[in-house]
Amino acid sequence: MAQDDLDPRDPERRGFPTAFLVGLVVVGLLVAGLLIVSHSTQPARHTPVQKLPFGPTEQAYAPNIHPGNISMSQADNMLNQVFTYLDGTISNDGSRTLKALELTVEFHDPFNQVILRETHRVVESSGPPLAAGKHRDFEITFEHIPVEWNQQYPSIRVTGLVLE
C-alpha cells in the first residue's frame, strides 16, 4: 500500500465523510417530513374519553333529536389513505338545551350485520350548547370502513346526552 493512499489531504478521501453526513441529514429530514405530513393529514379522532349519560331522562328526550340532511363523501390524502366523511345536521326539536350529544353510527354488510360501530360527539360540553328548536351542522370522519360495507347510509342513533 502506497503512502499516497492514506494521505488525509487527498480531496477524494476528505469529500467522502462530508457527502455521507450530508446524505444522512437529507434522509433524516425526509423521514421527519413524512412523519409530520402523515400526522397532520390524519383527521382528529372524535372518540370520547368517557361515555355520556343515557339514563331514563336522556332516553325520554332522545326522540326530540333528529339527524338530517345526511350526505357521505370520500377523499384520500398524499399517502393514499381513504377517509369517509358523514355530514349532516342535528336538530333539537325538544324544549331543553343540549350541553353535549353523542351519536353512534353503524355500518352494515349485505346481510344487514353491523361491521363497524363508532360513537362520536357532535355537541361538545366544552363548546356552545344546542338550544331548543335549533339545529347545527356536524361532520364525522371515518378512517377505515370494511370492504364488506353494503354501500348504504349507516344507521345513526343518539346514545348519550347531557341536558341543561
Image (tube, helix red, strand yellow):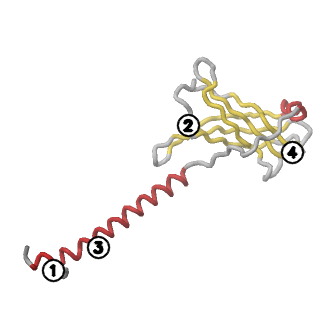
CA separation in Å, label 4 and label 3: 65 Å
Q: Residue at x 62, y 41 (%)?
A: 141
Considering the numbered disc 2 on the image, is that residue within a helix, a strand or a loop? loop
Q: Position of residue 157 (x, y in %)?
A: 75, 31
Give the residue type at disc 4: Ala
Residue at the disc numbered 2 = 144
Query: Disc 4 or disc 3, which is closer to the eye?
Result: 3
Q: Position of residue 68 (x, y in %)?
A: 74, 33
Badge 4 or badge 1: first in the primary sequence: 1
Q: Nearer the viewer, residue 67 or 15?
A: 15
Q: Position of residue 71 (x, y in %)?
A: 65, 35
The residue sitting at the front extreme is 1
CA separation in Å, label 2 and label 1: 59 Å
The residue sitting at the left extreme is 2
Residue at the disc numbered 3 = 18
Find residue 96 and report its image quarter: top right
Find residue 101 and report its image quarter: top right
Considering the numbered disc 1 on the image, is that residue within a helix, a strand or a loop? loop
Residue at the disc numbered 1 = 7
Q: Which image quarter holds the N terminus? A: bottom left
Count residues near mark 1 (Cα–Cα under 10 Å), then give few for <14, some for 14-19, many for 20+. few
Count residues near mark 3 (Cα–Cα under 10 Å), then give few for <14, some for 14-19, many for 20+. few
CA separation in Å, label 4 and label 1: 81 Å
Query: Disc 1 or disc 3, which is closer to the eye?
Result: 1
CA separation in Å, label 2 and label 4: 33 Å
Mark seen at residue 131: 4
Q: Residue at x 61, y 35 (%)?
A: 72
